[in-house]
Amino acid sequence: MVDDAYPPYSYQINGELYGIYVDIVKQAARLLSHEYQVNLQAVPWKRGVSSMASGDAMALMPPYIHIKKRPYIWPYSIPLQEEVVVAFCNQGITLKNLPHVKPERVLNIGINAGYIILDESLMEAQKQGLIQLWENKSTRSNIEKLARGRVDCYVNDRLSTLLGINKMSQITPSLNTSNIVEDKIVMRRTAHIGYLKGFEEKYPFKQDFILKMDAALRQVIDNAAAAEE
């Protein structure tokens, strides 16, 4: 299963999957085509996570590594790429000093549904009731709510958000995004294919597939890096 609304990494247009991670995995899948047929199914991220939790899916792309919070996912593939998660806020609002400096009011923070992307300071701020999280389906809906002032900040991957802001400005020029600024780096995380823990009787080929997919991914990523040199 693949996140259907996470451009430029994985996204769906007219039923077709596109994106940086989709391209990497498709290239790796071609290297394995003599042994395995790999089908990528686009799903809303939250549904993908719940399908892993219930054992209905063997793999999900592209989670960060959260061993304690998602004990049903293990192992993870080699890293597909490092992402920089940042907070974008409306001017005049900052998350930098939380929880040590209390805001004048509770700050509303948008996140993509199903994503776990808060650092320790923001988790403590949430625990203290200084911020409130609002899950929205996609990057686009979060950016729109941020631009309209319905949330104060939005926490997400930097590249995905910047591309989303640029696209939103083109598609909806009446929506003013000029007030949105990058506030702080929240974390740096690598994205992976996450595999279902256990269920070997349901997926007896799983361990062999994981090893061979990792080898294929490494070949694709190394070839891409060599081409850039």
Image (cartoon, grey):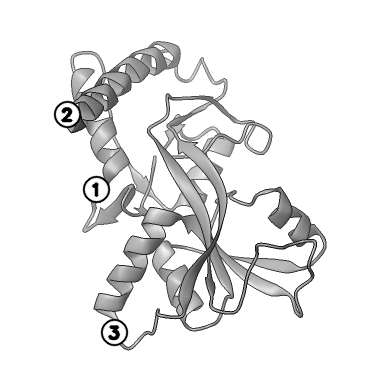
**Secondary structure state at the residue bearing disc 1:** strand
Of the numbered discs 2 and 3, the one sitting upstream in the chain is: 3
Q: What residue is shown with label 1?
A: 18
Q: Amino acid at mark 3?
A: Pro
Asked if the residue under mark 3 is in contact with the one under mark 2, i.e. CB atoms within 8 Å, the reply is: no
Q: Going 28% across and 43% down the picture, which residue do you hit?
A: 20
Residue type highlighted by circle 1: Tyr
Q: Position of residue 147 (x, y in %)?
A: 46, 79
In this view, 219 is above or below 62: above
What is the crowding at mark 1: few (fewer than 14 residues within 10 Å), some, or many (at least 20)?
some
The residue where tag 3 is placed is 173
- The Cα–Cα distance between marks 1 and 3, rounded to whole angstroms, is 25 Å
On the image, the x and y values in percent for residue 3 come to 40, 48
Q: Quadrant of the N terminus?
A: top left
Q: Amino acid at mark 2?
A: Ala
Residue at the (75%, 79%) spot, across then down: 105
At horizontal 37% and vertical 33% (from top left) the residue drawn is 80
In which image quadrant can residue 99 be found?
bottom right
Q: Residues within 10 Å of mark 3 (few under 14, many from 20)?
A: few
